[in-house]
Image (tube, rainbow, N blue to C red):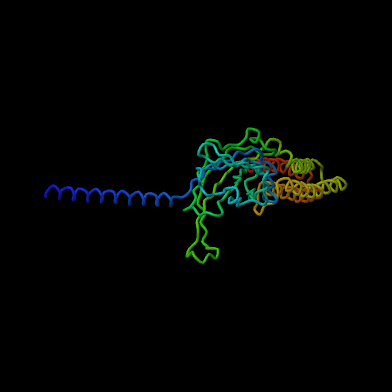
Amino acid sequence: MSTLRFLCRSWEFILLGLAVLSTAHAESKDTAAEEPAKVEVGIYLNRLYDLNATDGNFSADFWLWFRHREGLKIEPLKSREFVNAIETTTLGSDIETKGNTVWITEKINGKFNHGFDLSKFPNDSHHLRIEIEEANLESSQLKFSADQKNSMVDAAVRRVPGWHVRDFALRVEDHAYGSTFGDPEKEQGSIYQKLIFEITVERDRQGLILRLFSGLYFSVAIAIIALFLKTASDDIFSCRMAILSGMVFSVLISKDTAEKVVGQTSGSNSVDQLHGIGLVLIFALIAVTLVSRHLAESKRESASIRLDRITLLVIASAFLLANLVLI
């Protein structure tokens, strides 16, 4: 009787153990089902061009790829969204399954927004961004991971006309939306995964300074040379005033030309500052010319000439110092 009781008791323990294992297995399956889908994303930049500071945009051609485990019910090509794009065109796409991995590739041509801060021109650098976001599944349902090993910038892109590509970075961020977008089943906003490809570019200064400021340099140089014209003679005094007045307009034209090359900016940069200093110095030369004329008319021609020579050294030194500080 005791043997039978022992066998029954043992059988109860076995059934209980099987029930516990079955429950744990079911819970593990439910937990696995609740885990977000994992998608690896990478970018290869083929071309970077049309960096437009005036309109605030740039253009790029690149390969984009997604890799995920086979069997996931996701369609990255349909659900991906270029957050900061003005316009994009798909040049080609392909989907292959290799082993148990789904490999999706797409080639994109696009124009993207970027606010160019030119306050540090010509020593400015910019972080151009291509932002790709999952539009359908929240971060609790889908997670991006960056393919750091294979993402890169093509060697031919390292030098863009007027720019140098200094560095790049690829990272994943959560993009939180405070709104439910009217979803009646939600009480608070959503979070979606976003991939950011950031290209750091710095301005190529070779030949740029002379091209932008040559008009200003010639204008200020001619204005300084005009100090050699003695103000004792009526004709020479009139000629000197005409030259200085003409250089004022020359500086204004030079500033307008330089701004067209650099692009408009809400703040002040070295183009504005240096041309502004040039105008101030030329107006100072006009004032000195009037004082020099007064001294010459007062029979103090030697003092007039001495004033012109001292002014020449002061103005030339001040303009050189301004260039060293600002450029």
Picture residue at 39% right of the left edge, 49% below the top: 29
Quadrant position of residue 326 = top right
Quadrant where the C terminus is found in the figure: top right
Location of residue 274 in the rendering, given as x and y in whole percent from the top left corner: 69, 46
Quadrant position of residue 316 = top right
Picture residue at 52% right of the left edge, 59% below the top: 177
Q: Is residue 281 left or right of residue 32?
A: right
Q: Nearer the viewer, residue 27 or 306?
A: 27
Q: Is residue 327 left or right of residue 305?
A: left
Picture residue at 60% right of the left edge, 38% below the top: 44
Location of residue 92 in the rendering, given as x and y in whole percent from the top left corner: 66, 42
Q: Nearer the viewer, residue 30 or 238?
A: 30
Location of residue 312 in the rendering, given as x and y in whole percent from the top left corner: 73, 41
Location of residue 216 in the rendering, given as x and y in whole percent from the top left corner: 75, 43
Count of residue discs: 0
Q: Is residue 79 left or right of residue 3?
A: right
